[in-house]
Image (tube, grey):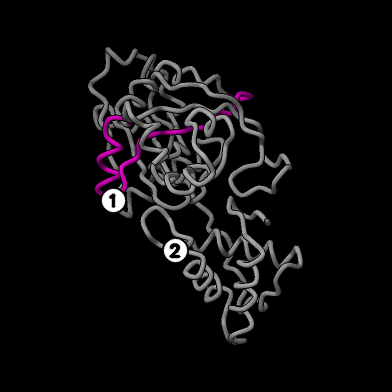
Amino acid sequence: MNRYCGRDFTDQELEQIRGLIKEDANRTRADLSRLTCQALSWFKADGGLKEMSCRVAMIRMDADGLISLPPPRRKPPPPHKIQFSARTDPQPGITQPVHALPQPQLCPVVHRDHSQLWNEYIHRYHYLGYKSLPGAQLRYFVTVDQHIVAALGFGAAAWQIAPRDQFIGWSHEQRQNNLSRVVNNARFLIMPWVKSKNLASKILAMVARRLPDQWENQYGIRPVLLETFVDTERFTGACYKAANWTYVGKTKGRGKLGPAGKQSVPIKDIWLYPLCRQFKKSLSL
């Protein structure tokens, strides 16, 4: 069994991929990733082909000598550089506790202009910067009196995390069947000029109530569990604890697409938040 991008590939599946390559010498790498996804039934939560993960997996297989991909047809485009604008300049500080502020509003990012603004805020002020969220996703701004005070992003869950999987109590097959019902809180940014006590935990409570319906409306799948990873060299995870998330252990530092058995990213604390009482039963069907 060979593991790439969170998926195990059998010898038979590798042979299928080799067959797709040999069938037509004119197929591009993009063609092959689409055909491989179709042949192996590798889909995203929204039903689309998991092409990008497949492309990365095949490139790594090629590097490991398991398959021989055709050469790329064109050079990859230069990475898009996000330019910082006056729209995301620091604002006057907000120091009142959350109970003294107007009611925060959770605003889904749906328009192109708002999407670009979200990207800019995250790239400018979040320590991880902006990267496209994998698979199905929802992004939000949080406003107070029409001023942006926070930004959140949710995307596909990590493929395999032992403490989370043990907490749920699911098998390998159950995880394969139900992982799309777990959603990852990949980004949470409180703007650096906002120092409002209990605002972060209030935001987490708000989004936990709103996200399940919005996710189901957009993707046809109702999530039952949220997960997130906290870099303890930078943060304590206190806001997740205050919002009743559950600490279940630490990652091994491999990352979502990292090589098996090797640490490639910082080890982080794992926090989970059930979205319904019967979440374990729902994830074990």
Give neighbour class at mark 1: few <14, some 14-19, many 20+ (Cα, 10 Å). Answer: few
Q: Which residue is mark 2?
A: 49
Q: Position of residue 152 (x, y in %)?
A: 40, 36
Q: Residue 192 versus residue 20: which sits nearer the camera?
A: 20
User: What secondary structure is marked by label 1?
Assistant: loop
Amino acid type at image mark 2: Leu
| Vertical relation: 205 (above or below) 52 | above
| Vertical relation: 65 (above or below) 195 | below
Question: What count of labels does the image hold?
Answer: 2
Q: Is residue 284 left or right of residue 65?
A: left
Quarter holding residue 86: top left
User: Residues in magenta?
Assistant: 208-234
User: What secondary structure is marked by label 2?
Assistant: loop
Q: Earlier in the sequence, mark 2 or mark 1?
A: 2
Quarter holding residue 199: top left
Q: Which residue is mark 1?
A: 220
Q: Position of residue 68 (x, y in %)?
A: 71, 74
Q: Position of residue 78 (x, y in %)?
A: 59, 64
Residues marked 2 and 1 touching at CB (< 8 Å): no
Give neighbour class at mark 2: few <14, some 14-19, many 20+ (Cα, 10 Å). Answer: many
Q: Residue 172 versus residue 158: which sits nearer the camera?
A: 172
The verdict on residue 232 being magenta is yes
Q: Is residue 51 left or right of residue 139?
A: right
Q: Residue 46 versus residue 124: which sits nearer the camera?
A: 46
Q: Tell me how far mark 2 sits from mark 1, CA to CA.
A: 16 Å
Identify the residue shown where x is 62% and y is 42%.
255
Amino acid type at image mark 1: Gly
Q: Position of residue 126 (x, y in %)?
A: 51, 36
Assign the N terminus to one quadrant of the image. Answer: bottom right
